[in-house]
Image (spheres, rainbow, N blue to C red):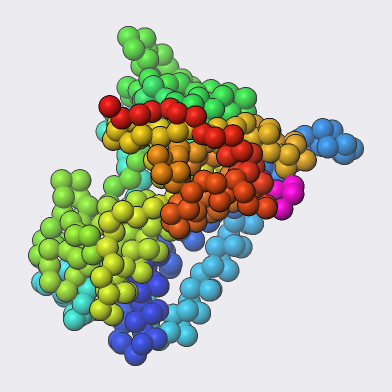
Amino acid sequence: MIGSGEAAKYLAWTLARQGQQVVVIERSLIGGSCPNVACLPSKNVIHTAKVASLAGRFAEFGLATGPPSVDMAGVFRRKRKMIDGLIELHLGQYRASGAQLVMGDAQFTEPRTVQVALNDGGTRWLRGERVFLNVGTRARLPEVPGLAKTSPMTHVEALNLQRVPQHLVILGGGYVGLEFAQAMRRFGSRVTLIHHGAQLLSREDPDVADALLQLMKDEGVDVLLNTGIVKAAGHSGESLQIEVATGDTTRVIAASDILVATGRTPNTNRLGAEKAGVDLDSRGYIRVNEKLETTAPGVWAMGECAGSPQFTHAAFDDFRIVRDNLAGGNRTTRDRLIPYCLFTDPELAHVGLHESEARAKAVPYRLAKILMSTVLRTRTLSETRGFMKALVGDNDRIVGFTAFGAEASELLAAVQTAMLGGMPYTVLRDAIFTHPTVAEGLVFLFASPPRAAFTSG
């Protein structure tokens, strides 16, 4: 295994417990990005920011206290404690399974053979009957004059901040940009978010993008749409001058810090894939078939480096596909129903088709939509912002679902289960959900027959 991310580590532990000799080569992050610098640490910090926001609303909840102050060093310590615990859990799994973990940088020298530059010095050569690649991706830095010289932050450095930036500029209106924009604003930073597109989250429906834009504005984030960065000067963490262009108008933004969140690039540039007969596509991702087999015999690729959706839960399913096929199964990546959640506050959760996708694919649907304020649980929380909507096909099956509101991620699981089971929407409409829960809102979402929204032809 080259890389110890979600797919590789579970496959390593599984095969090792079956008695196979397994070696996992990891450059730096035991367990991959998710427990170290991505999913879990970011959600840890985001939750602290929510606590800070709630503390600032003390009078609304009938509490008498003073305005809270943010100790970013304390935020960092809480996050670091969680990471250290997760690393210990991973090391325990390696010990229990018998899989060997080697810390170093691996490069192919020939098919199914790698040279490992060990982190503690020295070199080791390994040859395997089978090789599994799970090397992940890293933040992509746009080619903007002067930007690289400013030493901009990516999500990795932002999660290690032990101070509150005075004025943080964020490049990119995607998942990472939005989550950090809200969190850092709640910690006390002035935040400017620059996005080249006409709406945030370009793949979402306009009503969702508009709702998120309003959330950012209400939080005090300055959002610049249809805006690109022309050049940058200075040093992030000290003083910056960032020239931006909106149409024919340019201006200079003075800031203290800059965070780049404009996409990802695969960690295949140092792999020596060509020496192993492993083909890459034009963007550097490993070419795989629907069984995650590469162009080289006996070599598989999993997770983001193989072009899989950039979610840990998708990588975990990659592991299950490879595991089952090694045991004689016939699983593929075809037609996977992969949900996702943006962990702003409130959350955005989605599974299946968007309205724009359904229209583009000429998939007829009826629409059910309600405000989250209709769900009484949100009133007990004083968190009534948002809405939920579902796309229902002609056969009464749900083909898409989106929720923007409190505890939206928990709603998602119930709807996805109904979709996987091929159940009609009436099953959720007629279910007896606990009161008061957010899931109870599904009853009211489907209480009235979904109205016709798009008919092909």
- At horizontal 12% and vertical 71% (from top left) the residue drawn is 297
Q: How many marks?
A: 0
- Rendered-image quadrant of the N terminus: bottom left
* Residue 240 pos. (x, y %): 45, 27
Residue 314 visible in the picture = yes
Q: In this view, does 157 lie above or below 224?
A: below
Among the 4 quarters of the image, the one containing residue 228: top left
Q: In this view, does 237 lie above or below 424?
A: above
Of 224 and 151, which appears nearest the observer? 224
* Residue 307 pos. (x, y %): 27, 52
Q: Is residue 436 magenta?
A: yes
Residue 261 visible in the picture = no
Q: What secondary structure prevails in the magenta region? A: loop
* Residue 198 pos. (x, y %): 39, 22
Q: Does the magenta stretch include residue 368?
A: no
Query: Which residue range is magenta in the image?
Result: 434-438
Of 433 and 185, which appears nearest the observer? 433
Of 154 and 390, which appears nearest the observer? 390
- Rendered-image quadrant of the C terminus: top left
- At horizontal 36% and vertical 9% (from top left) the residue drawn is 249
Among the 4 quarters of the image, the one containing residue 220: top right
Please state if 99 lies on the left or on the right of 348 as rendered: left
Q: Which residue lies furthest to the top in this view?
A: 248
* Residue 27 pos. (x, y %): 34, 65
- At horizontal 28% and vertical 35% (from top left) the residue drawn is 361
- At horizontal 35% and vertical 29% (from top left) the residue drawn is 455
